[in-house]
Image (cartoon, rainbow, N blue to C red):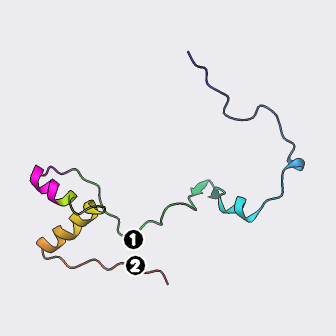
Amino acid sequence: MPTKKPAGSPEWTDPEDAPELTAEMLADAEVFEGRTFVQRGRGRPKAAATKEQISVRLDPDVLTALRAAGPGWQSQINVLLRQALQLRERPTKRVA
């Protein structure tokens, strides 16, 4: 049976021997506000109004037609439903 490797280095490193912090290191750093972790870096920021994930059952021929549209077919479902329900497009927040 395989054994787990230790999570960190077993050797203690003197903080005085730590390398100089670079801009790249700071860009990848985890940032906390008090005890609250603030996620930074990768991924896009949360939108003001996020979409809700649901599960839907579709007829096979409908699903085949949607998938035939190629990449982005799942996002296109929302557009098609908005058109069918005669809903206005939601305004997108533009970053200046």
Q: Residue at x 71, y 58 (%)?
A: 25
Q: Mark 1 or mark 2: which comes first in sequence?
A: 1
The chief SS type of the magenta part is helix
Q: Amino acid at mark 2?
A: Lys
Give the labeled residue for mark 2.
Answer: 93
Label 1, secondary structure: give it: loop
Stretch in magenta? 56-65
- Quarter of the image where one finds residue 83: bottom left
Give the labeled residue for mark 1.
Answer: 48
Percent coordinates x, y for residue 80 in the rendering: 17, 69
- Asked if one can make out residue 70 in the rendered structure from this viewpoint, the answer is yes
**Residue 5 colored magenta?**
no
- Quarter of the image where one finds residue 49: bottom left
The image quadrant where one finds the N terminus is: top right
- Quarter of the image where one finds residue 70: bottom left
Q: Is residue 51 left or right of residue 44?
A: left
Q: Is residue 34 left or right of residue 55?
A: right
Label 2, secondary structure: give it: loop
- List the single residue furthest toward the right: 16
Percent coordinates x, y for residue 90 in the rendering: 28, 77
Q: Residue at x 47, y 80 (%)?
A: 95
Percent coordinates x, y for residue 5 in the rendering: 65, 27
Nearest the camera: 95 or 62?
Answer: 62
**Looking at the image, residue 13 lies above or below residue 79:** above
